[in-house]
Amino acid sequence: MKELEERIVQQGTVKPGNVLKVDAFLNHQCDVELFDHMGAAWAEHFKGKTIDKILTIEASGIGIACVVARHFGNVPVVFAKKAQSINLDGDQYTTTVYSFTKQKEFPVIVSKRYLNEGDHVLLIDDFLANGKALKGLIELCHEAGATVEGIGIAVEKGFQGGGDQLREEGYDVDSLAIVESMDPENGTIEFRS
């Protein structure tokens, strides 16, 4: 998606350690109009597939997922929580994932009331690096008996291989911007064509 790539080049910052900071428009301050355009792009890509639920992981994916849901008939958005709380009651699906950004493992939890057998799920997230978070969400879907119909990613760091691995496993991954390389020394970012 050219619009997203242009925003990354204009407002993104490449940091040491393969970190791409896009908090000016994607995951701290949110550009809702951009999210709407992203939703339209995913609606076009996944048209013809039954999508009756969107699943993401807290926190950065929530805003994007809520706007995207409008393009899929206002389907419910469920987000996996990263910590147990007193508000989480009843039976739950739980797994553990490693976060590249946070450099640690954390639990991901979804109430069994909100992820069900027969659901047709679109996974949405802001970033895809090594794919660990998405594999955790996929595991929760499989445990529930839900079908993962597709995966929508705003920014994929293609050089880290997570997206390619998910595609090899047969998942329909639509990343709107795939960063092929980035250099913190001079701030350059190259996209996959």
Image (spheres, grey):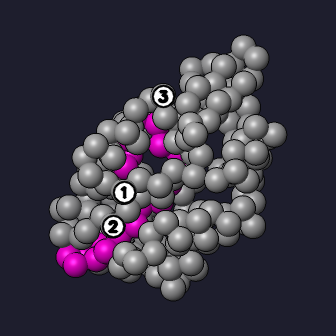
Q: Identify residue for label 1.
A: 172
C-alpha distance separating marks 1 and 2:
7 Å
Residue farthest to the top, as pictured: 185
Highlighted range, magenta: 114-134
Other-residue count near label 1 (Cα within 10 Å), few / some / many at <14 / 14–19 / ≥20: some
80 and 151: which is toward the camera:
151
Q: Residue at x 44, y 69 (%)?
A: 46
Q: Do residues under tags 1 and 2 come within 8 Å of each other at their CB atoms? A: yes
Q: Identify residue for label 2.
A: 149
Q: Residue at x 40, y 32 (%)?
A: 161
103 and 84: which is toward the camera:
103
Residue 74 included in the magenta stretch of the image:
no
Looking at marks 1 and 2 on the same chain, the residue that comes earlier in the sequence is marked by 2
| Kind of residue indicated by mark 2 | Glu
Q: Residue at x 26, y 63 (%)?
A: 141
Q: Identify residue for label 3.
A: 159
